[in-house]
Image (cartoon, rainbow, N blue to C red):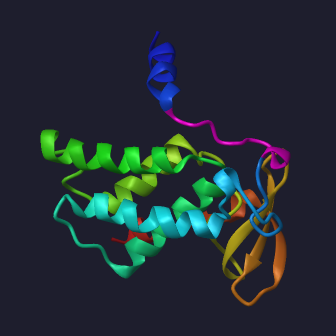
């Protein structure tokens, strides 16, 4: 019963692409959904999402802004619609206003968590991760999700077990 309700509630959300073959490769393709590249879609979506989140009266640090930017980028690569990105931000702001929800945390961090829960449960291409070799971006994830190719900030790519990668934000949230 609860599962049926949860499925119905998430029915309006776009479905993230699960397998590598179903995803658009941000490093190769020239035009994505609606004729935009990931970078063009990000440049349209990010400022609008931040304006929606700032309606709560909060101001966000550079770290929070970058975390939101990278999470939006990963969602766009997984072909989540920009409308859903805006809708979730609006819901969080309305929940805080109407119910006082998320008072103990930044709405930017709550937004990132909501996107990950809805669309990026598994590691996805485009996400920023920490490795034992430094910070980088996930470029590819194996079909079984056990391994990932990460492009480090220096340009080197490494193939690592997904379990050894930490998503950006998890360690910082634990530290705060």
Q: Nearer the viewer, residue 1 or 83?
A: 83
- Counting from the top left corner in percent of width and height, residue 4 is at 50, 14
Q: Does the magenta stretch include residue 167?
A: no
Up/down of 7 relative to 125, above or below: above
Which residue: 47% across, 44% down? 84
Q: In this view, does 124 lie to the left or right of 139?
A: left
Identify the image quadrant of the C terminus. bottom left
Prevailing SS of the magenta stretch = loop
Which residue: 74% across, 41% down? 18
Residue at the far top: name it.
1
Q: Nearer the viewer, residue 7 or 28?
A: 28
Q: Is residue 56 left or right of residue 4?
A: left
Q: Is residue 49 left or right of residue 76?
A: left
- Counting from the top left corner in percent of width and height, residue 136 is at 67, 77
Up/down of 146 relative to 46, above or below: above
- Counting from the top left corner in percent of width and height, residue 106 is at 28, 62
Q: In which quarter of the image is residue 52?
A: bottom left
Q: Is residue 3 left or right of residue 36?
A: left
Residue at the far front: name it.
35
Which residue: 59% across, 47% down? 80
Task: Confirm whether residue 158 shows in the render.
Answer: yes
Q: What stretch is highlighted in magenta?
A: 13-22
Q: Which of 93 and 107 is in front in this view?
A: 93
- Counting from the top left corner in percent of width and height, residue 14 is at 57, 37
Residue at the far bottom: name it.
154
Which residue: 47% across, 46% down? 83
Task: Confirm whether residue 168 shows in the render.
Answer: no
């Amino acid at each position: 019963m609860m599962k049926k309700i949860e499925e119905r509630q998430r029915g309006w959300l776009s479905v993230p692409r699960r397998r590598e073959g179903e995803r658009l490769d941000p490093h190769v393709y020239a035009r994505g959904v609606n004729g935009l590249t990931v970078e063009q879609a990000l440049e349209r979506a990010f400022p609008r999402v931040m304006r929606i989140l700032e309606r709560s009266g909060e101001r966000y640090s550079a770290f929070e802004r970058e975390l939101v930017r990278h999470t939006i980028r990963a969602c766009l690569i997984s072909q989540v619609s920009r409308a859903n990105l805006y809708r979730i931000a609006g819901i969080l702001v309305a929940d805080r206003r109407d119910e006082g929800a998320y008072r103990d945390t930044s709405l930017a961090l709550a937004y990132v968590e909501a996107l990950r829960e809805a669309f990026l449960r598994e590691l996805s291409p485009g996400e920023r991760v920490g490795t034992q070799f430094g910070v980088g971006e996930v470029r590819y994830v194996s079909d079984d999700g056990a391994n990932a190719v990460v492009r480090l900030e220096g340009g080197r790519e490494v193939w690592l077990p997904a379990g050894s990668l930490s998503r950006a934000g998890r360690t910082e949230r634990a530290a705060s």
